[in-house]
Amino acid sequence: MISMPPSERDLHAYVDHQLSDDDRRLVETFLANNAQIAEQVRAWQKDAQQLRAALSGVLQQPANPDLDPVMIRQRLKRQSRRHLASAAMLLIAVSIGGFSGWQAREMTLASPPLPMTDALQAYRLFAQQGILPADYKVSTDGDMQGWLDRYFTQANRLPDLSGAGFKPVSGRLLSTEQGPAAMVVYEDQGGHKISFYVRPPGPKNFLLPRGSRSDGGLQAEYWSGGGYNYAMVSPADTPAAQMLKQTTQF
């Protein structure tokens, strides 16, 4: 049972339909008597609806052959054969060495997912390909930091890249396995783009050490802070990528 008045976390859970029936009725009663907060919650609900509508377009993209059930079954069979071969080699080695009482263990372990793969994919979809429109665009009186703070109140401040000629121009809300995420796109006068990506670490609280990696022509600089994971993504082997490696602003 949530306490009254509801916290911001409770209100977001209400928007995301994650409350029990009793808690939902408590929140609705509270909102009925607090017009200002109710207006804010309605705005969050509108944002959530727009996000779901936007993501529905992504689901209509061409099928990924790597996710085809036939291909998945074939990969699993190959992995199973490799595991059996590894176990057999271990048993033979133990037998030759004259040791007894040992049990064969699995020789290969599944590789952990590469860090911030979702940030790289988001850059490809929205900064490079422009598949979907932005949820928020900076106008003359716009405040990108204020927009981001609506969803990530404890996150780090947006990096200041104005010294390199990049300014934030648009933002997009996303959904990941770890929870809600956001991407802010920076752009310079030449139309070159850099993205700032933020998401929670997930149920296991998997925070990242500061690091860097390249993938498919993109460069990602990643780190953690304030309870969130972050990444700055740009095309690799460009002045922008070198600038992200050298800067200490984030």
Image (spheres, rainbow, N blue to C red):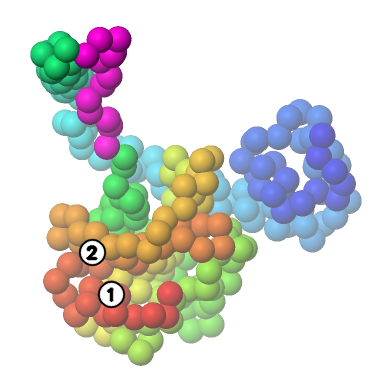
Side of 196 where 200 appears, left or right: right
Residue 73: in sight, yes or no?
Answer: no
- Answer above or below: position of 61 versus 104: below
Q: CA distance from mark 1 to mark 2?
A: 9 Å
**Measured from the top left, where is residue 118 in percent x and y?**
34, 49
Specify the farthest residue to the front.
98
Say what amino acid the circle numbered 2 marks.
Answer: Gln
Which mark is drawn over residue 102?
Answer: none
Asked which secondary structure carries label 2, the reply is strand
Q: Which residue is mark 2?
A: 219
Picture residue at 27% right of the left edge, 30% below the top: 109
Stretch of the chain drawn in magenta = 99-111
Say what amino acid the circle numbered 1 marks.
Answer: Lys
Specify the farthest residue to the bottom.
163
Q: Which residue is at the front of the view, 35 or 119? A: 119
Side of 225 where 25 appears, left or right: right
Q: Quadrant of residue 250?
A: bottom left
- Answer above or below: position of 200 versus 58: below
- Dot 1 and dot 2 residues touching (CB under 8 Å): yes
Q: Which tag is nearer the camera, tag 1 or tag 2?
A: 1
User: Tag 2 or tag 1, which sits nearer the N-term?
Assistant: 2
Q: What is the crowding at mark 1: few (fewer than 14 residues within 10 Å), some, or many (at least 20)? A: some
Magenta portion: prevailing SS class = loop
Q: Which residue is mark 1?
A: 245
Q: Quadrant of residue 21?
A: top right
Asked which secondary structure carries label 1, the reply is helix
Q: Which residue is at the front of the view, 68 or 57? A: 68
